[in-house]
Image (cartoon, rainbow, N blue to C red):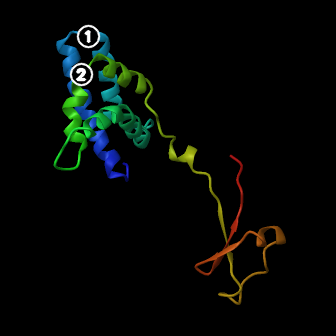
Amino acid sequence: MIQDTRKQRALEEMEVALRDMLRSAASEQKQLYVEKLTAILDALTRPEPQAQPDWDEIAARWLDLIRPIWYERLKRPRSRPLLLKDIRRDVLNAGESFRAQVLQAFESIPILQTPDERIAACIIGVPNRATNPRSRPSPPRSIRAKRRTCWGLTLAGVAIPG
């Protein structure tokens, strides 16, 4: 999941807001909105194993959508810090234009690449003569220039295209 607690809270509030928008659209018999909101909620609450959503990007999109509502609410006097749950009612009362913005922002759900597509690394461990006197001969000069010592091994950096 996400490390940033603000974005975690944004995702929680987003789910609550989307469910309420779905209920509202269903009661108004707006079938197009019902279908699209259901698809968004399904993609977020029951993602397929090979297509995990990019939660960080989704939270960022949601925060971008509610930012004008947030700033409007900040103008009002208050006795404590403004929380995301404090603007929930304002988000739900934002109307058709906000619902259309939500549908447009989440028309496509950002998906993370699988780990085998994301990770491309190679670490070559070469014994360090300073920590191991019985080590093998030095690596070639091209690698020696790039090496770094770590835990008694000299790690030679090797660039992998990709």
Task: Give the quarter of the image for residue 109.
Answer: top left
Task: Give the quarter of the image for residue 55.
Answer: top left
Q: Which residue lies at the image location 27% right of the left edge and 40% below the top edge?
A: 74
Task: Give the quarter of the image for residue 144.
Answer: bottom right
Name the side, left or right, on which 101 lies relative to 84: right
Q: Which residue is mark 2?
A: 22
Which element carries disc 2, helix, strand or loop? Answer: helix
Q: Which residue lies at the image location 79% right of the left edge and 80% below the top edge?
A: 137
Name the side, left or right, on which 145 lies relative to 45: right
User: Which is nearer the eye, 76 or 17?
Assistant: 76
What type is the residue that disc 1 sits on?
Lys
Q: Which residue is mark 1?
A: 30
Vertical relation: 81 (above or below) 25: below
Q: Which residue lies at the image location 33% right of the left edge and 18% below the top edge?
A: 97
Which element carries disc 1, helix, strand or loop? Answer: loop
Which of the numbered marks, if any, corresponds to residue 105?
Answer: none
- Residue 31 at what x, y percent from top left? 27, 10
- Residue 17 at what x, y percent from top left? 24, 30
What type is the residue that disc 2 sits on?
Leu
- Residue 88 at what x, y percent from top left? 21, 34
